[in-house]
Image: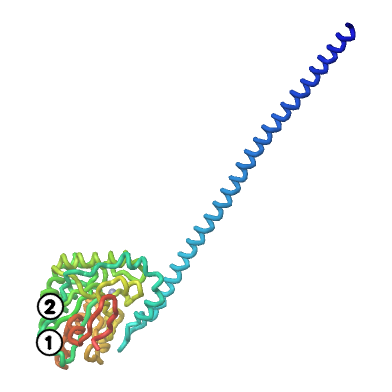
Amino acid sequence: MDYQKKNVNSRKRHFEKSSYSERGRRSERRRRGELRAKFTLVATAFVLIVVMVVLGVKLSKISDKKKGNSGENRVLADTNEDKSNDNESVNNKGNKKDTSSTGEKDNKSNGGEDKDAAVDAVANTGQSKWIRDDLDADKPMVALTFDDGPYEPVTDKILNTLKKYDARATFFVVGSRVSSYKDVLKKAYKQGNEIATHTYNHADLTKLSAKKIKAELDESAEVISDAIGCSFSALRPPGGNINDRMRKVIKVPMIYWSVDTQDWKSRDAKSVLKECKVIQDGDIVLMHDLYPTTAQAVVKLVPRLVKEGYQLVTVDELLYYKGINAEAGKVYYNGR
Ligand SMILES: [Zn+2]
């Protein structure tokens, strides 16, 4: 009996002992399981963060690369344009051919922006009004042209001389000046002179985007139409600066010159007349209706040319009678 009791007690103790250690092991296992789960969670989160950071860096590198490339293209485009400027800004004397075909090839890759903002064709031009039908195509012709006006005191004097000899000229007007000198512009138009544009702000168009070039021409068309009832059919680019973007965007012919009187520089009538000593059939003469000395020179120049047998014509007349099909965006230097 004693023995039995003893045995039971020891089994009980043993049982209690083993049950304690089993529970301890289980809770240890649970604790480890929980730790493992926590570790896995933290590790996953860490890996995710690393992946996100790497992706972020890669994406920013790609976008930087893209930005860098477009910057490069812009620089290239500008360089191309500068080159074409250099070709064209050279003082132009005699026969000079349009170099647009070669220039356009270089710039083909940058055409997108230009296409989008292409200037609409200038509607309602006065071209039909400033091409007379009674000129003699076999007689020599000269087109006198005046930039930077209108300026009533000078423009008016020039108009009076032109009228006296039934002569015509072309006025490349600065749009922002038109509202101040509307009357003299109307007078010029009524006398049959061609009203063309020299931009709205006398802007160097080679420095402007397609959109801004369009704005310069649209605003000019608006003020000219407001003053004379019709728009221009030719542009003289300020500074004589031309680039490939302008060739694509501008929807009227661009008119250069073959005789540069340098009137703005000399401010001397005699000097202007001297520059006009050798005038040939088909010449386009560059002057500015801003200087009284230019008007004084015109008083002498017009009768002299008429006497020599020249017909004094508008630019549109010159190109038309010389059989030149003036195209939008192309440059014309004379009527030969
Ligand atoms: Zn000018």
Pick the residue in front: 100 or 268.
Answer: 100
Give left or right: position of 96 versus 190: right
Assign a secondary structure to mark 2: loop
Q: Where is residue 207 in the image (x, y as percent from the top left)?
A: 36, 69
Q: Where is residue 52 in the image (x, y as percent from the top left)?
A: 56, 48
Give left or right: position of 247 versus 172: right
Name which residue type carries label 1.
Leu
What is the total number of numbered labels drawn onto the structure image? 2
Say which mark, if any, is on residue 212. Answer: none
Above or below, comparing residue 16 to residue 266 in the picture: above
Residue 201 falls in which quadrant of the image?
A: bottom left
Name which residue type carries label 2.
Gly
Above or below, comparing residue 37 to residue 149 in the picture: above
Looking at the rendering, in which quadrant would you find the N terminus? top right
Q: Where is residue 58 in the image (x, y as percent from the top left)?
A: 55, 55
Looking at the rendering, in which quadrant would you find the C terminus? bottom left
**Callout 1 environment at 10 Å: few (<14), some (14 to 19), or many (20+)?**
some
Residue 61 falls in which quadrant of the image?
A: bottom right
Q: In this figure, which colouring scheme has been used for the structure?
A: rainbow
If you read the primary sequence from the N terminus, does the residue marked by circle 2 or circle 1 appear first? 1
Residue under numbered circle 1: 135
Can you tell me which quadrant of the image ligand 1 is in? bottom left
Cα gap from disc 2 to disc 1, whole angstroms: 13 Å
Assign a secondary structure to mark 1: loop
Residue at the extreme right of the image, as rendered? 3
Residue under numbered circle 2: 192
Pick the residue in front: 29 or 87.
Answer: 29
Q: Where is residue 184 in the image (x, y as percent from the top left)?
A: 15, 71
